[in-house]
Amino acid sequence: MNLRRLRLNSNLRDMVRENHVHVEDLIMPVFIKEGLEGKNEIKSMPGIYQFGEKEFLDEIGECIDLGIKAVILFGIPKLKDSCGSDALDEEGLIARSVRAAKKAFGDKIAIITDLCFCEFTDHGHCGIINPHLKTVDNEATLEISAKQAIVHAKAGADMIAPSGMMDNIIETLRTALDEDGFSHIPIMSYSTKFASAFYGPFRDAAESAPVDNEYVPKNRKTYQMDIANSREALLESIIDEAEGADILMVKPALAFMDIIKEIKENTLKPLCVYNVSGEYSMVKAAALNGWMDYDTLMMEILTSFKRAGADMIITYHAKDAAKLLK
Ligand code: PBG
């Protein structure tokens, strides 16, 4: 058998290439920090910034110029309290930012909002804490999540992406959105999300690490999934599909290729993967040390997500990859 005949030159290799990364697949995360003027580079994520409330619009403008179709917004508010009030306020940081982005760019790019409370609470957990159970209270958090979804939708968000791993969140948000006249707004569920060490740098970027506290452990293991479980991983996404999620997700991505493939083969909704902060930081660190070639490594990773079954990729490489693909 001669398999090398089709590898002989790049024309032939391109003809038989099975998977491609398109700029349309890429979603760029954008961090907006209240009160910041200019931008702050995140130490653990070279090339990624927290932006002020004016400057984040320039970042979105750059994404549009590169052909990127969507950004996902994360907010770092000044006010943090026990229930994440800023996230529930129509004048809060994310509501203002969505309105500003829609005003500036209209339908040139989709504005997705991450729906969670960890950036908005003083304890850094993804919802309201129940001190008796020593965890985030599911029902109380569903209630405020529905409010947050309406705040995002009213502000003009094109898609809402709940990331807190509360049970029944998709059904709750779908019902709330439908009842308030937002049945046209899709929900991208962080359906299969693991409690992962790969989120470390994000928590610097979003200033959302759980803080030391007498009531709850300083990790998210009581709501995010155990990284060792694959049957449960599939179940999480199957349930969210049944509850009405429009897009499913696996997060993190790089160490979870088996999960991506499994979910792709057993569900029918489009599948997003989140190429998370720690995955980006590892690649950047290796590249900055001259240990590996950044562009080649980045494209290998992104292409592998497509091969595993991803339809779209949230990635901090989005702008770099879009430039290469131009
Ligand atoms: C909010 C949220 C997190 C990430 C996305 N949304 C942090 C977390 O769960 O701790 C992580 C993204 C990344 O690491 O790039 N819940």
Image (cartoon, rainbow, N blue to C red):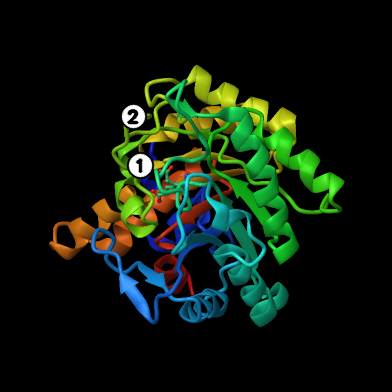
Q: Is residue 115 visible?
A: yes
| Image height of 317 relative to 137, above or below | below
**Amino acid of disc 1:** Pro
The residue pinned by badge 2 equals 217
Residue 210 in the image: state x and y as whole percent: 35, 42
| Mark 2 secondary-structure assignment | loop
Residue bearing mark 1: 210
Q: Is residue 95 rendered to the left or right of residue 177? A: left
Relative side of 31 to 105, left or right: left
Screen quadrant of the N terminus: top left
Name the amino acid, label 2: Pro
Q: Earlier in the sequence, mark 2 or mark 1?
A: 1
Asked whether the residues under the numbered discs 2 and 1 touch, taking CB atoms below 8 Å apart as contact, a structural biologist would say: yes
Tag 1's secondary structure? loop
**Looking at this view, is 265 or 56 the one in front?**
56
Asked which quadrant contains residue 295, the reply is bottom left
| Res. 263 image quadrant | top right
Q: Is mark 2 within 8 Å of ligand 1?
A: no
Q: Name the one closer to the observer, 258 or 127.
A: 127
